[in-house]
Image (cartoon, rainbow, N blue to C red):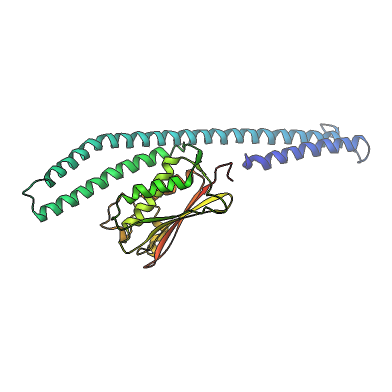
Amino acid sequence: MRRWLPGLLAALAMIILGLGTSLLAVWEILPNPTFSAVYEADLAGLVSRMGFVLGVLVLISAAIGLGIQRTLERKQAEEQRTQVSAQKRFFQRLDHELKNPLTIIRLGIVNLQQSPSLDQHQAGSLERISQQVQRLQKLVVDLRLLSELDSGNIEHKPVALKELLEEAIALSGQALEPSRKISLNVPHLPWPVSDVWGDRDLLVLVFRNLLDNAIKFTTSEDQVEVRVTEDGRMAIVDVVDTGPGIPTEEIAHIFEELYRGQNARGVPGSGLGLKLVERIVHLHEGTVFVRSKPEVGTVFTVRLRLAPEAA
């Protein structure tokens, strides 16, 4: 619409100019000489007719252009919907076709691992195979989830942030050694942390993925902490670790699909975890960014809208 606004304004200006000149001439405010030729008309009539005709022509061309633009936009939107739908069907079929074979492979590996005649070398090989099968399973699930998120349809309702983070910590903490803990720092004064606005299950996935990464890239000597603040409009959640950090040249790429940095080589993962985090946070009209210092640590910061009654 904005592209055609200047044309519409020009057309209206021409019509107003023509009618205004005609009225001023009729009221004898402007001189109104008569021109004689094959066609005779006084100045007021000539200018008013020319202004009206030109204005109508511009309006018609603007309307035609606007109609063409809207047709193209509808066509592009329909093509995009078709593409998203086809992509979603593909990943659903992929998930269906790979789920059973991968499950059977994992069961076979478990059976082999329980064999009494298994030596240490064979056990190590089976464990590496099992990790790669798990990675494939997670990759398929994450790809399907990404395709489903492209529709943009998510639930929006108040979500208790403290309880959400406690659940994410409990789920991620299952992979921790008993001696390691994830600390949660949530303010209680002068009031408890407010609810956020969004889809609880998807937000749990966001913080679980961030915590899983923090755990995978740290050792038992490192610390992992979740800190919460708010600014009256947004909740601010920092996922902090004292691990090896992210190389400066890799920071710009960590949210790309299937990107795995040098530190990630040999570490289980699908390469889609941070892409899912970014996509889900953006669907919640929030932001996510990272700060990191090599050999010092990393901070992932997620900003989420507070629930309407809390904002």
Side of 8 relative to 26 (left or right): left
The residue positioned 34% from the left and 52% from the top of the image is 212
Residue 59 falls in which quadrant of the image?
top right
Quadrant (top left/top right/bottom left/bottom right) for the N terminus: top right
Above or below — where is 98 with respect to 273?
Answer: above
Q: How many marks?
A: 0
Query: Residue 250 occupies which quadrant of the picture?
Result: bottom left
Residue at coordinates 17% horizontally, 40% vertically from top-left? 107
Residue 300 to residue 24: above or below = below
Residue nearest the observer in this picture, 73 or 248? 248
Evaluate whether residue 272 shows in this view: no
Closer to us: 14 or 1: 1
Report the residue that reaches farthest toward the left.
Answer: 117
Q: Residue furthest right?
A: 28
Point out the residue furthest to the bottom here.
295
| 290, above or below 305, in the image | below
